[in-house]
Structures are given as C-alpha cells and as structure tokens.
Image: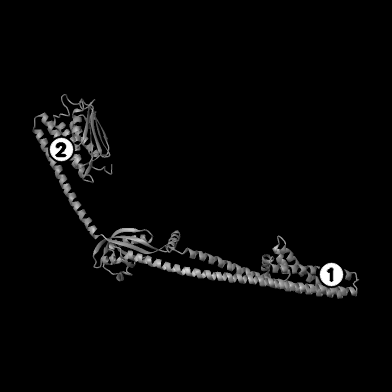
Amino acid sequence: MSEKNNFAKNTFKRLHVDRKMISILIVFTVLGIFLAISMVVATNSLSGLRGYATFQTNWTEARKEASFQLVNYVKTNEDRYLARFDSALHLLKSAEEIRRELLGEGADMDSVRQLFLQTHSNPQDIDNMINTFVWFHSFPDFENAIEEWVKSDEIIAEMEALAAEVREYIRNNSLSESQQEQYVASILRLDRELTSTKHGLASALASGTHFLSSIMLWVAISLGFILLATGGMLSFRFLKSIKNWRKEIEVSEQRYRSLYEQNPNAVFSVSCNGHFTDVNSVFEEMIGYSLEELRGVTFDKFVKPSELETVREYFQNALEGNPQTYETIGILEHGELFYVEVTNLPIFVDGEIIGVYGIAHDITYRKNAEQKIKEQLEEKTHLLSEIHDRVKNNMALISSLIQLQQEMSDSNDMDNYFESTVSRIHSMALVHERLYHTETFSSIRMDEYVNELIESARKKYCSNSEELRVMVDSRPVTLSIKQSIPAGLLLNELLINAFKYGSKDGKGKVKVSLYQNKNEVFIKVSDNGPGFPDGVKFENPKTLGMTLISSLIKQLNATYELTVEDGISFSIRFKSCAKMSKTA
C-alpha cells in the first residue's frame, strides 16, 4: 500500500498540478458545503414555521372554544360548560408554558416537547419549531410575534380570573341577570382582544416567514452565483491543467520512445505471461524477427530448451519486483545458438507490475574469446608444467653429477665445495618449486620458502641437530621472481655459515628473522658461535661463500649490517619489487 501511495504522490508531482486550481476546488467545496447547510437550515426553519402555523390554528380554536363555553356557563350555570372551558384553557396554558420555557435559561427541551404534544402539534415539526424559536427569536419580526403571544397570555389570564368569579357566584346562587349580562359582555370583549392579538401574531409570523424566506433566497442566489463563478474558474483551470497533463504525457511518451528506439542495446518488453509486447530495431536485427512477428509470441521459443527452466525462474523473480541479470543461450531465426546477457526489470504502472522490461547483449564474441583464452591458458599451463619438470630434472641431474664427482674425489676440501654447490642448486630448485605452486608466476611468498630451506641446510650441516636450537621469526614476505632467486641464494649462504661455523660440537643457537614493512624487506641470521676466524674479513672475502654473499647483496641493491659480538649477526635490508600478497 505504501508503494502505491508513493507512486501516486510522485505521479502527482510529475504532472505539475496547478495549485490555483486546487485552491479554487477547496473554495468550491467549502461553498458547496455551506450552501447545503444553508438549505438544510432553511428547510428546517420553514418546517418549524409551518408547525407554528398549525400551533396558531389549534390555539385559535382553543381560544374560541374557551370563550364560547364560558359564555354558555354564565348563561346556563351548568358545570359541563365549565369543564369544557377548563379543557380548552389547559391547551392555552400549555402554550404559555412553552413560551416561558423557551425564553428562560436552561430550558428543559423534553418538557417543551411534551407541552407541544399537548397543543396537538405535529410531532415531526416539534424539533424544528424549537430550533426555529431558539435561532430566530431575537429577530424583529419574531420579537413582535412573541409580544403578541405575551398579550394573548395576559388576556387569557384575565379570562381565567373572570371564570373564577363567575364560578363563585354560581356556587353561592347569587349571580343576577344583570351580572350575567355584564360577564357575557366582558367575555366577548376579551374574545375580541384575543382575536386582535391573533391577527397581530399571524401578521408577525407571516412577516418573519417572508423575512426568513428572503434571507434564504438571497443566500441561495448568492451562493449559487459564487458556485457558478467558482465552477467556471475551476473548469477553466481544470481544462488548462488537462492540456498541460496531455502535453507532459506526450513529452514523456516521446522520451520513452526515443530511449527505446535510439538505444544501442537490444531492448524488449514482455507481459506477465511472457508474451512480447514491444521490441526495438536493434532487437529485431539481433534475433532476426520483426515486431509484428514477435508480438504475442512467448520468449520460450527463443531460449535453448536446456536453459528454459532457469530463464523462467529469472523471469518470475523479475515479476516479483527483483531486477535480474543473467547469461543464457538463445536461438536465432535459422536455429543458430548464440550467447546473450539479459537484464530484466519489472514494469510498474500505478504501483502494479504489468510486465518485464529487458535489455539484451549478444556476448557470443566475448564467450568465444573467453573459450580461446581458456584453451591458451591450458596450453601455457601445460607448457609451464613441462618447463618446470625439465628445469627440475636438469637441476636434479646437475646435483647428481656433482655428487658423483664428489664420490670420486679424495679431498675433504673438495667435498665441502661440492656440498655447498649442491645446496645452492637445491635452494634455486626450491624457488622454482614454490613458483610453480603459486597462483601467480610473478612473485612468491619467501616466508613459506624459508622453513624448507632451513630444514634442508640443517640436515646437511648439523649432525647433532637435536642440540642445536633454531628460532625462526618469519612474517609474510612477497618477492618478485627477479629477487626471489638471489634472495634465496643469499639466505642459503647465511644459513650454511651459521650451521657450519656458528655452533660448537653441534650445540648452539641460530636465529633467523624475515619480515616486510610496506615494501622494505628485512633478513637477519645470527648465531652464538666463535665468529670469524682470524684474518677473515667480510670486506675482503677470500672464500666462494663470502664472495657470493657480497655479490648477491649488490644484485639486490641491499644494505647490510654485520655485528661480531657473542657470535655473528648478519642483517640485510632491500626494497621489494612485488606487491604484498592478498593472503598476507
């Protein structure tokens, strides 16, 4: 529901709705409501005035009845006329109580309704009569009517007092004929006065009705004119807004068609049941069918059968509101297969998904290129494996030849030379082995290589290896293939010297440190042996090993620090040409 509301709100904004039209519409609505209320008030008020007309008729009949019965009572002295007089007087007194209640504060409306019922008023008009009195009793014409009402009540009170006197005379049998004539004359005079007040009351009510009708008429005419003018303005603004909306929609449609037709990619749209509804010219050229041929056809026809189930799943996900991008195999006009990358987007209209919008890329060339690269990679991998095997076999052959030569030699000094040479060859072979097993052939992890090199040198040059402590502080170090072989040879020479000369009777301590700080590599090999023999200086090397160490340091553009104190400590640092490994 919130998505629909947001969509409607955005659509409303995009249509540039005229705010003046909205203001006019609000005014029009308010005036319409006011007119409806006015008509309801007028109808109810007129209904109340109609009820008062009926009320006045009943009051007049009761007044005539009271006068007539009182005259008969005076003339005949019969109590039945007095009872009829009292009955008529009761209605008149009820009318007086109605007036007093309505003019008083805190009127009891339930009591007023009961009093109106006693005056034989129409029950359907009673509420409107009460409301009309409350709303309009302060208007001049209605004030005149209330004054006439008060006069009538005073005359009726005088008639009631006259009836009480007559009753006393009759009960005492002291009413003479002259008194009878006087009382009859008084009653007739009061009746004439009541008739006069009736005419005044009727005239006041008629004037009030006319006044109220005039007000309602002018209100209705004024509001009708205002509503007519407002409706005209609203219609004008609405028609203008419709014109703007139509123009906006046309521009939007043109933009959409331009984006659709001028798109360099193959673009299509399908309904919720998978039928093509529209395609651009690029899609027609790619697939080999025209829009007329495609319209109403499902996409199943253009998908390889083995891929169809997967494509349907992607399509269903797009219908659920989730954009999809995937690769599949399509079928061209003549049955040719081609690789295609498809992006599916849901089409929303009024917040509802009505289909899927798609963009297709022919990736057959890319797929073929990838396959070719894959084949070339496999070929190069095979070639590299072949080269690695040959290098490995050649190094093993060289080592074997040197060892055979060593066995034929009777000189101990020559044996040491042969062993050192085999060790150097082994260190290079380890680098090639590491390089072959890495994911990239441009660099290797020297920290993994150093442990194997230490074990190999330890077995060859330390007969009592259990009593020789070797401590390794190795952290990830990545070197390029150009630096890894000289660094490996350098580390091998330092380890040979440490194991051969840095221990006493196979006992001692050798410490190896290898780490990298950004692109600077640190190698340190130290022992607690006797140090250099007398007359041997590193600055002026006389042995092959020392000469090789000096040459390798120069090859690496490295700096070194040699400390001869409680053994020998050799520290070397140089810049690495390789980037740090991601696994580091």
Answer with the quarter of the image where residue 14 lies.
bottom left
- Residue 379, horizontal then vertical, whole percent: 18, 52
Residue 162, label in figure? 1
- Residue 111, horizontal then vertical, whole percent: 72, 64
Name the side, left or right, on which 33 lies relative to 454: right
What is the quadrant of the C terminus in the image?
top left
Name the side, left or right, on which 24 lies relative to 218: left
Q: Residues within 10 Å of mark 2 (few under 14, many from 20)?
A: some
Real-space Cα separation, disc 1 to disc 2, in angstroms: 154 Å
Residue 425, label in figure? 2
- Residue 555, horizontal then vertical, whole percent: 17, 37
Depth check, front residue: 179 or 136: 136
Residue 536, label in figure? none
Answer with the quarter of the image where residue 530 lies.
top left
> SS for tag 1?
helix
Q: Which of marks 1 and 2 is nearer the N terminus?
A: 1
Q: Which residue is drawn at 17% across and 47% down?
A: 385
Q: Is residue 283 above or below residue 397?
A: below
What is the quadrant of the N terminus in the image?
bottom left
Observer able to see residue 73: no
Answer with the quarter of the image where residue 244 lies.
bottom left
Q: Which residue is drawn at 8% across and 33% down?
A: 408
Q: Contact (CB < 8 A) between labels 1 and 2?
A: no
Q: Tell me which amino acid carries mark 1.
A: Leu
> SS for tag 2?
helix
Residue that lies at the very extreme toward the top in this rendered image = 534
- Residue 521, horizontal then vertical, whole percent: 24, 37
Q: How crowded is mark 1: few (under 14 residues within 10 Å), some or many (20 or more)?
A: some
Q: Is residue 533 above or below residue 283?
A: above
Name the side, left or right, on which 148 lies relative to 220: right
